[in-house]
Image (tube, rainbow, N blue to C red):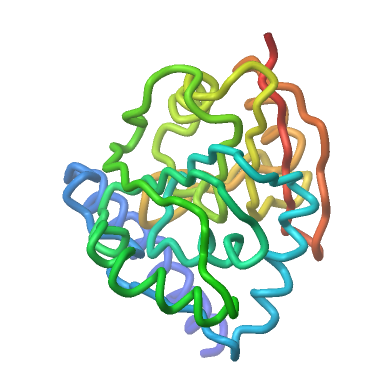
Amino acid sequence: MKKLFIAISVLFLICSCTLMNRVFLAKQISSYQGHSKNCKLYSSKDSTSIKYFEKLVGLCDINTNDSILSIGAGSGGREFLLSLFTDSILFYLQDIDTLCISKMRIDSTYYPHYSKLRGQQITNTFRTISGTKNSVFLPANKVNKVFIYNVYHHFSDDIAMVKECNRVLTEGGKLIIAEHVLKRNKKSYKFCDYGGYYKNESNFVSDIENCNFICDTIIEDGKYWRLFIFSKLG
């Protein structure tokens, strides 16, 4: 009976994943609301996240007057956490659904909330971009950093998006990706709901380096979480 239950459970998961793939991939991703339905506001209770993003400022060498494109920004919370520890940065917040990062919400809710959390005025600037599943609507050589935080596995065509990152980055600009990876003995695992893939570390690096990048740093945080930092080649 126990083996039968396990077999049925596995079959259910496989069928569920397949069904989800069919439903989501049959529609244009541009019509899908995604995580940004949850317009999360971080607070002082989120001390672990705040400390982590403070650490990211140094790890990613984020500096005054940087211009940063954040792909899959969702609610913009991560970018505002970075803003607790930085000044005079121009953030382009890009998402398929911009509900949570509308100019009205940024001005009326996020600036006051995070300025209060910081204890002084947030000085970074935020501009909203409505993207597509494989396009970023920015001119070439526009930013010196691209930030993709726990979003890469959602890309249905990750190579197309990486090429877009290369296009909008200045020469020597940084592509910063925080992502889970698979065990080394697996090539990739299809992510159920968005059509993208998780990859192992070596395939992850080689795929991106083939798009005119060089991997500068891989920082491990736990068993499967990685911070990848790439530089755009000339």
Is residue 72 left or right of 152 when viewed as pictured?
A: left
Name the residue at 31% across, 59% down: 101
Q: Quadrant of residue 68?
A: top right
Name the residue at 34% across, 72% down: 39
Q: Nearer the viewer, residue 82 or 215?
A: 82
Residue 28 image point, x, y percent:
18, 42
Q: Nearer the viewer, residue 46 or 29?
A: 46
Q: Quadrant of residue 85?
A: bottom right
Name the residue at 60% across, 40% down: 65
Q: Quadrant of residue 48?
A: bottom right
Residue 70 image point, x, y percent:
48, 46
Q: Residue furthest front?
A: 120
What is the count of numbered marks? 0
Is residue 47 left or right of 124 when viewed as pictured?
A: right
Above or below 170: residue 179: below
Q: Nearer the viewer, residue 9 or 140?
A: 140
Name the residue at 44% across, 25% down: 160
Q: Residue furthest top?
A: 234
Residue 33 image point, x, y percent:
24, 59
Residue 133 image point, x, y percent:
32, 37
Q: Nearer the viewer, residue 168 or 156?
A: 168
